[in-house]
Amino acid sequence: MQTDRLSKQIEFIKEIDKIKYIQRRTKLINSDRHENDAEHSWHLAMMTIVLAEYSNTPIDVLKVLKMVLIHDIVEIDTGDVFLHDTTKNHDNTDEETTAAKRIFGMLPPEQAEEFIIVWEEFEEGETNEAKFAKAMDRFEPLLQNASNKGGTWAEYNVDYQRVIDTAFKIKKGSETIWSYTEDLLNKSVEEGILLKR
Amino acid sequence: MQTDRLSKQIEFIKEIDKIKYIQRRTKLINSDRHENDAEHSWHLAMMTIVLAEYSNTPIDVLKVLKMVLIHDIVEIDTGDVFLHDTTKNHDNTDEETTAAKRIFGMLPPEQAEEFIIVWEEFEEGETNEAKFAKAMDRFEPLLQNASNKGGTWAEYNVDYQRVIDTAFKIKKGSETIWSYTEDLLNKSVEEGILLKR
């Protein structure tokens, strides 16, 4: 027995294997090896489970997990957009929407629609779940950079103010993790691995 | 503000980054690049979300996700145990229990206990959630091997009967995916990438 529905789902499962080749700018903890999007997404999922208690509001953890697990799948087609690349549009672009439609569109129609809605909700960042998911997405590279003598901050000459400005979304998801982030960034300035002009 | 509780959780989050270095025997789809445990765990989580409807019984998807996301964390200390290595004990060994206590034990006590219980439930494979999680864990390498001219079946001289015997756990989680698996393995025999003696 092999239904058309299941075949579509298996083709999708095979297609998204490609996310394991999408390399991010950030590197693993205490490492010079770049992280890929599958590893990144796994880590955000673990962070969600461990840190959900710090959300500013009650959240549906299952929905946040779906968000962080799928949030970078569009990058199979678009590639990774570096957070501190000021020449790139960081909003939900036409290119990303096309990618979402192609990749999630491999699934049976109502499942494709569900995935696209979850991805759009994450991108818009307005619901409690999206705010927390975005907080995790911003928080992970800070831990990595702080462990790597500044990591991409040093490599791409990103200063304290720019890091604070982009990390600020963490506050919308979790005041507690934002407070930890402020401490971490101040400590990084003291250690000389993050430049305060 | 930086509580002792949050500090413990962050140390755990940094520690589990090491799973990204634990290499499996299987390789990515249509690839000669080995998969690591973080990528593998992410893929099982995605498969769980996409395929949950085929579980033999209703399941708590959030619990299955926790299982598949954490199931290989012990391998940070023990290393990957290859499914078809007949010289190794594949049951929940003392070494794995020690690893679970060390790594999950970095978390605040009640959270550590929760993670250990979820991991043990997965290992025992008796609840509906554990059966489905184990089905995903067995199913993913079959898709990989079938896409890689036999992959580890060919590389380690594993025949059809051995593959069927180890894949049989899929049936306990999902009759539908088991049926798909039987078709896939028969097709692999026909294609000459899986040996039927």
Image (tube, coloured by chain):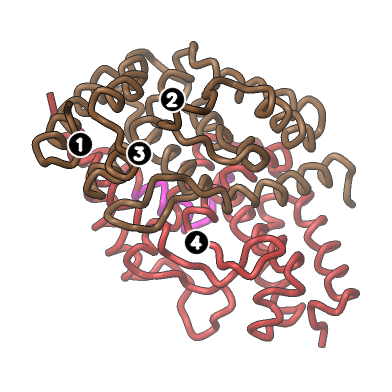
Chain colours: A brown, B red
Tell me the distance, in whole angstroms, between the alpha carbons under discs 4 and 1: 31 Å
**Which segment is the magenta one?**
B116-128
Is B181 one of the magenta-colored residues?
no
Amino acid type of the residue that numbered disc 1 sits on in the rendered structure? Leu
Residue B36 marker: 4
State the image coordinates of residue B191 (x, y, percent, origin top left). Answer: 88, 74
State which tag comes first along the sequence, 1 or 3: 3
Q: Work out how far the residue at label 1 is from the one at label 3, CA to CA, in angstroms.
A: 14 Å
Q: Is residue A144 above or below residue B179?
A: above
Answer yes or no: is residue B183 visible: yes
Q: Is residue A51 above or below residue B194?
A: above
Drawn side of residue A71 relative to residue A78, left or right: left
- Which residue has dot 2 on it? A134
**Residue designated by label 1:** A194
Determine the CA span between mark 4 and mark 2. 25 Å
Report the amino acid beneath label 4.
Asn
Quick check: B139 left or right of A192? Answer: right
